[in-house]
Each structure stands twice: as structure tokens, then as C-alpha cells.
Image (cartoon, rainbow, N blue to C red):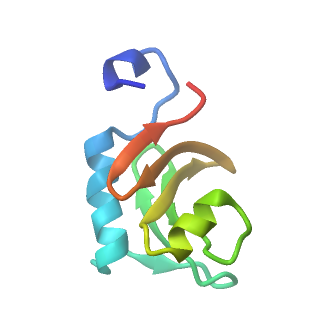
């Protein structure tokens, strides 16, 4: 969905903001943290969102991509998936 199409949608960080966090997540920049239990890396985003790397141990198609070396991450808030990022391409979900 294009950014202009999201005007009336729920507040989600813009693609540019997500991509900066995505590069930080996979390059290990400042602000990258790990969840204690899973060890997955994540970065805080505006609007109470978080960018989380895909867990490669899962059995989904996205985990399979991560295992094959692709960079996969998800923008989430309150347990809801808002966007997916695969190798730097942002896809906004369900809006």
C-alpha cells in the first residue's frame, strides 16, 4: 500500500523510518536490543511500534527465507503485525 493510501489508516511509522531501523537491526547499530527469552533482536519505533527480526526457528515461509540468508523483519504493536520488511522492501499489512 502506498504511503498516500495510508492517510486515514492507523498510525504506523513511515517506510523511511522503518528502513533506517531495519538497517540498524541487521548491522548491529545503537539501540538494537534482544528479547531475553528468544534472543531475537528488535528496535523501538515511533507510535509504540517495534521492529523485530524473523525467528528462523519457526516453520513459516518467512522463517525459511530467514534461514536461507534473506533479511526478514516485522513491524508490530500490541501483538499485531503492521508491516513486513524483506531485504529492505517494506509491505504494509491489513490496511
Q: Is residue 90 placed above or below 25 in the rendered structure?
A: above
x then y, percent, for residue 80: 66, 45
Please name whichever residue, 82 or 1, is drawn nearer the observer in this view of the structure.
1
| Residue visible at 42% across and 21% down in the picture | 6
Residue 54 shows in this picture: no
Question: Which residue is at 32% across, 81% downward?
Answer: 28
Side of 78 where 1 appears, left or right: left
Q: Residue furthest right?
A: 59
Left/right placement of residue 23 relative to residue 78 reads left
Pinpoint residue 41: horizontal percent, then vertical percent.
Answer: 49, 76
Q: Is residue 81 above or below residue 71?
A: above
Q: Residue at x 46, y 14 (%)?
A: 8
Residue at x 59%, y 78% (from the top left corner)? 35
* Residue 38 visible: yes
Given residues 4 and 54, the one toward you in this image is: 54
The number of numbered badges drawn on the structure is 0
Above or below: residue 37 compared with residue 22: below
The image quadrant where one finds the N terminus is top left
Amino acid at each position: 500500500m502506498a504511503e498516500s493510501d495510508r492517510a486515514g489508516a492507523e498510525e504506523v511509522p513511515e517506510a523511511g523510518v522503518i528502513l533506517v531501523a531495519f538497517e540498524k537491526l541487521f548491522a548491529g547499530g545503537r539501540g538494537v536490543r534482544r528479547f531475553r527469552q528468544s534472543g531475537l533482536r528488535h528496535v523501538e519505533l515511533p507510535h509504540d511500534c517495534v521492529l523485530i527480526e524473523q525467528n528462523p526457528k519457526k516453520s513459516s515461509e518467512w522463517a525459511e527465507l530467514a534461514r536461507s540468508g534473506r533479511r526478514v523483519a516485522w513491524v508490530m504493536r500490541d501483538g499485531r503485525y503492521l508491516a513486513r520488511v524483506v531485504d529492505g522492501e517494506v509491505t504494509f499489512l491489513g490496511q
